[in-house]
Image: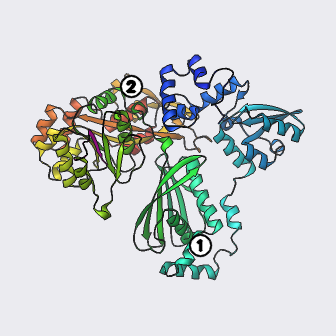
Amino acid sequence: MAKEEQKLGKKRLGDLLVDVGIISAEQLQTVLQEQKERGGKLGQILMAMGFITEDVLLAFLGKQCNVSYVSLNEYGDIPESVIQTVPETIVRHQKLIPIALEGGELTIAMSDPANVFAVDDLKMMTGRNIKVVIASEAEIKNAIDKYYGAKGSMADILKEMDAPEGSEDDVELVKEQDTGSDIIALEAQGEDAPVIKIVNLILGGAVTAGASDIHIEPFETSLRVRYRIDGVLHEVTAPPKKLQNALASRLKIMAKLDIAEHRLPQDGRIKIKVQNKGIDLRVSVLPTAFGEKIVMRLLDPESLKLDLTLLGFDENSLKIYQKNIDVPYGIVLVTGPTGSGKSTTLYSTLSTLNKPDVNIMTIEDPVEYVLEGINQVQANNDIGLTFAEGLKSFLRQDPDIIMVGEIRDTETAEIAINAALTGHLVFSTLHTNDAPGSMTRLNNMGIEPFLTTSTIVMVIAQRLVRLICPRCKEQFEVEYDKIKHLGITPEMVGGKSKVMLSRGTGCDLCSNTGYKGRNACYEVMEINDKIRDLVLERAPTHLLKQMARENGMKTLREAAVWKLLNGVTTLEEVMRVTFTDTD
């Protein structure tokens, strides 16, 4: 991206954006305060907070520098004759790419059009006039990899390996490693240069692809690597089976795990820097029949949305949620399966409530993101620091707001309830299929109904749906009769017999999936007197759900359908993520 921090004329970027009305003065002050506290480029912070898109920012910067903005994803194929005008070493070093050659003029796409030194060098080297256009740094990198070849591809790295695949020496090495007897050999393999490059390629590729998880899975005769992108697993090029143990050793060394232990599961953390971004990885190693499966969760602080309005709440649900997180005491529960975005919702909530006069404490397993001004504790069952023990200590630390990573057992639930009864606001998560089911779940854990009705003020359930790629989005018509089974009423579609829906056709931006990014669907159940009466009567979940809907609760299916009818997601996503509502 361009060096937007420089002065553009006599004014800085932020002031110029305010002058033309792209952002407001209040938004600029918010961004400047964030920049002061956390550092970073103004443009990156503007995009991270959702105040501006990259396309708009680049187009604006190009206008200020009197150059055009080009989207390389929409530009089309660049002729080989154009690519050959500039050597690979130059394009990679200067982060630019030639895109057109007309007569004696060479057009160069750059992320920093103010880099006059690179332009002068190209002019001297090629003997041509240089026309500069501005493009996204990520698009330039992808184009370089496409036309010049991916740097350090799996095939290139494997060429460095001396031993041919399937040699007898390889078989012996695997057997020796499986015994765990030769620790020195394991360490040596883990530090082998090609192995390091392969690990770096896998990790860097995941970050570039925007993956949330990396799966390295051993099978009898092969190794499989998959990235979870927008909630769906995608297989990528994997190294050969013979490198299985070497890869595991390298990752264990990076995560400071026991490389000689192959029989027991292990958990660790890795901190890496990719594309100038700090990324935390949660590493889980699990022994399987054919070796150790390794799963890594990627935690990118820059991708964390701390603005509640960006998470996916509809207007009415957001009002209910904001009202109930401002209460002085009580319990707010967030439910949903693993990977449904519960942590993001809680972090965003705590960030909203984080003020100098409020003492916020959390106990998590693990601490996923570090939030400035909040006291975060890492649970450790091995030394007895469980959620329950941490909660007991918290009550002696004069907290105002407490967040417990998860209510897993009766003891943790009882202490959380006690904290709420003594004047604290408690946030936590619970594993249930929907919001009403949480009351039944606590009842099954042995918590008396009068305690839950006295403390719980709100329960929300959530799921993540994939968003339609904005670049290849198209509309299509469908018969109402074919979608009414989703719970879509005639009133929702204005009584029309045909309904316009949206879908993605697939493009380079979304890797031909038709989806780009995810958003949450929320089911917000506010606990009122009618629901309390049902809980005290130990009413079943379906009656609680029926009452909650009568009180205005929008179910997960209804929230997903709203996104479908508004062109945010697709029919397939609604069916994949949510169930039909039954009373």
Amino acid carrying label 1: it is Gln
At x 48% / y 63%, what residue is drawn? 294
Kind of residue at badge 2: Val
92 w.r.t. 354: above or below: below
Q: Nearer the viewer, residue 257 or 147?
A: 257
Name the quarter where the N terminus is drawn: top right
Residue at disc 1, secondary structure: helix
The prevailing secondary structure element of the residues shown in magenta is: loop
Q: Residues within 10 Å of mark 1 (few under 14, many from 20)?
A: many
Circle 2 crowding by C-alpha within 10 Å: few under 14, some 14–19, many from 20: some
Residue indicated by mark 2: 493
Q: Is-magenta flag for residue 397?
A: yes
Q: In terms of sequence position, does the residue under pointer 2 or pointer 1 come before the other? A: 1
In the image, which residues are magenta?
A: 396-406
Q: Visible in this render: residue 340?
A: yes
Q: Is residue 485 visible?
A: no
Residue 436 at what x, y percent from top left?
23, 41
Quarter the C terminus occupies? top left
Name the residue that disc number 1 marks.
Answer: 189
User: CB atoms at circles 2 and 1 under 8 Å apart?
Assistant: no
Q: How many marks?
A: 2
**Is residue 87 positioned above or below 22 on the image?**
below
Q: Residue at x 67, y 58 (%)?
A: 153
| Residue 92 x %, y % | 73, 47
Instruction: Pinpoint residue 77: horizontal percent, then vertical percent.
Output: 74, 40
Residue 185 as seen in the image, left or right of residue 451: right
